[in-house]
Image (tube, grey):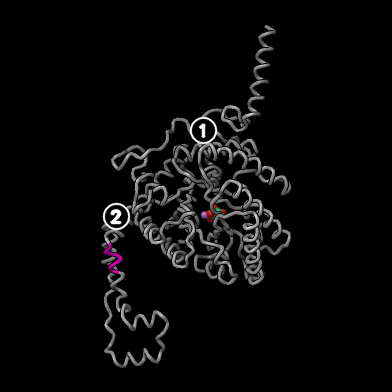
Amino acid sequence: MKMKALKILLLLVCLKAFCYAVQASKTCDSDGWEGEFFTGIPKIKYEGRSSKNPLAFKWYNAEEEVLGKKMKDWFRFSVAFWHTFRGTGGDPFGAPTKNWPWEDGTNSLKMAKRRMRANFEFIDKLGVDFWCFHDRDIAPDGQTLEEANENLDEVVALAKDLQSKSNKKVLWGTAQLFMHSRYMHGGATSSELQVYAYAAAQVKKAMEVTHYLGGENYVFWGGREGYQSLLNTDMERELNHLGTFLHAAVRHKKKIGFNGTLLIEPKPQEPTKHQYDWDAATTANFLRKYGLTEEFKLNIECNHATLSGHSCHHEIETARINGMLGNIDANTGDPQVGWDTDQFLIDIPEATMIMLSVIKNGGIAPGGFNFDAKLRRESIDVEDLFIAHIVGMDTMARGLKNAAKLIEDGSLAELVRKRYQSFDTNLGAQIENGEADFELLEKKVKEMDEPKVASAKQELAELIFQSAM
Ligand code: XUL
Ligand code: CO
């Protein structure tokens, strides 16, 4: 009997030694979770339009070519770690509602590693190649910056290992400069020098780990970079600080050899009353003023677009015509709710308009479509996480197909071309080249009859558009 117990003990010791040797392997990992996370959920496949299976794609067919490019390459879909793995369903009036089986209710390092493994199983089963993260989503904060960085390093080492085994990539990483109370006045625009320095140190580390993970972009979203009242705010000084902060980020990017695109994600407000990167045009102007246009592009989020009083299509077009369309945070708001509800986009006409711009842009790589979207508070089944992403991906695929149809048909482009054809003349060319001064135009007016003005044909444009849905 004694002998048997000794043998078992010996076996356990050997197993433990073996586990240390193959750190992060599924059976031996020290995060206390054995086996699959999403049991009973298969790899999501394309089954075509007639499928009634909620756990299958009806439209998104990764390998299918549309206008000479595979669907997966048009989209480069990404899962947002913070919503899918840190979203609790809590809101300002109510407690968390999600009770994912793998969660143990802590923000421990052990739990962070377990969640990271769940993330990789999720993106693999969903058939998505990318994921996005904030530093503090994936690893617990620390009492000191050093401790926080050590935690981050440990989780990032696991993520790197899981990435290399699964061939998945980081679309973008970012630093969370909005949750901790030290950031209450902002990060780069805080009135406190020590906070500006802390934000810089945090971004430095987040850029380094994004680079280490082979991230293709790095995002700045300034949730607290703005003001609550102009009466106590030196707006000019805060904007100058933001400019110097971003220049320092560019210098650090070059120093560490990170070649990813730096992106700014406009949002008008929430949590701050007025955020400095209000919308695409405001942000483009900011980048011009501070000489940063060569170094930054924009990450357009649809729900942020509507909060700023624009459509997502408008924001994407504004970024595109400024040569700044870098990435899309694919989500939508609720027309009856005035805040950032971060819902999965299911509006097919909206998806079609987005894809019209993306095709005109020739795609958005090295950016992609990040699902910065979350389940509703009341959706609490594990399979809901998959269904939400499937409907989001199918919607975008329908948008791509419709947009391709419209482009191949050509009648919408022809309608627009005709609308401006009066400029396709010698005088039009002089005007567009900036050679026609007011005297010349006044002379021409005197030679011409009353201008002939054609119909804008908006309803015809809408008819052509809807016939492609
Ligand atoms: C907040 C938001 C963020 C950014 C990254 O509205 O969109 O999640 O995408 O910080
Ligand atoms: Co976002």
Q: Main structural element of the magenta stretch: helix, strand or loop?
A: helix
To which residue does mark 2 refer? Answer: 469
- Residue at left offset 66%, top offset 70%: 237
Instruction: From the viewer's side, name the closer residue of 180 and 415.
Output: 415
Highlighted range, magenta: 410-415
Q: Are there few (<14), some (14-19), or many (20+) residues within 10 Å of tag 2?
A: some
Residue 196 marker: none
To which residue does mark 1 refer? Answer: 37
- Residue at left offset 59%, top offset 61%: 272
Q: CA distance from mark 1 to mark 2?
A: 38 Å
- Residue at left offset 42%, top offset 33%: 42
Question: Residue 270's x, y, as percent?
Answer: 55, 59
Question: Residue 348's x, y, as percent?
Answer: 35, 53
| Mark 2 residue CB less than 8 A from any atom of ligand 2 | no
Up the image or down, 120 lies above or below 68; here it is above
Whether residue 320 is visible: yes
Whether residue 231 is visible: no
User: Of the residues shown, which amino acid type is indicated by label 2?
Assistant: Met
Instruction: From the viewer's side, name the closer residue of 426 and 316.
Output: 426
Where does the C terminus fall, quadrant-wise?
bottom left
Q: Secondary structure at mark 1?
A: loop
- Residue at left offset 31%, top offset 55%: 402
Question: Residue 435's x, y, as percent?
Answer: 41, 85
Q: Earlier in the sequence, mark 1 or mark 2?
A: 1
Instruction: From the viewer's side, name the closer residue of 222 and 17.
Output: 17
